Image (spheres, rainbow, N blue to C red):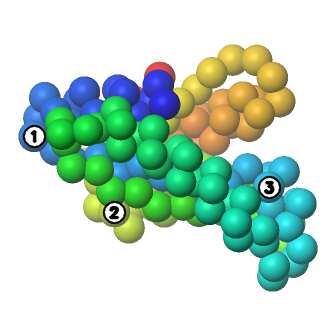
Amino acid sequence: MHAVEYAVSVAERYGARVHALYVLDPETVRRSAPGEPDDDAIAAASEGFMDAARDVAADRVELTHSSAYGFSPTMKSRHPGSVVLDAAADAEVDFVVVPREPGGEANELLGRAAEYVLQYATEPVLSV
């Protein structure tokens, strides 16, 4: 949510919109049977994040959102960072805000995704 707060502040300042992306983590993907993800649990987690993002954006900026698998047990080239960059291209964003927090296994994955985005993005990136 820290990254959403930054994105909303910048978008509000420049009259822009925000596109929030919910990236499904590897554990969620691994727990799902191939071809049969736990749609209810995934939808609930994604909607929880999007509800919180809507609260931050409120009447300040336009907010759109999407969800994506950030990991695939069958596609070695699928990486959370590449998923972020693909979503940024699809949403035609002008800049990307990615969270990067130290500590813990989940945050290590987040940090690796942020590093990937910082290295390969063609748009400016704000890492918070």
Q: Say whether residue 121 is visible.
A: no
Judging from the image, what secondary structure is the residue with disc 3 in? helix
Q: Amino acid at mark 3?
A: Thr
For this orientation, the residue located farthest to the top is: 102
Q: Amino acid at mark 2?
A: Ala
Q: Residue at x 54, y 61 (%)?
A: 67
Task: Tell me where residue 8 appears, x and y as whole percent.
Answer: 28, 34
The circle drawn on residue 15 is 1
Q: Say whether residue 59 is visible.
A: yes
7 or 61, nearer to the observer: 61
Label 1, residues with CA under 10 Å away: few <14, some 14-19, many ≥20: few
In terms of image quadrants, where is residue 91? bottom left
Give the labeled residue for mark 3.
Answer: 28
Mark before the other along the chain sequence, 2 or 1: 1
109 relative to 71, above or below? above
Task: Tell me where residue 21 appears, x and y as whole percent.
Answer: 48, 52
Judging from the image, what secondary structure is the residue with disc 1 in? loop
In terms of image quadrants, where is residue 106? top right
20 or 89, nearer to the observer: 20
Mark before the other along the chain sequence, 1 or 3: 1
Mark before the other along the chain sequence, 2 or 3: 3
Label 3, residues with CA under 10 Å away: few <14, some 14-19, many ≥20: some
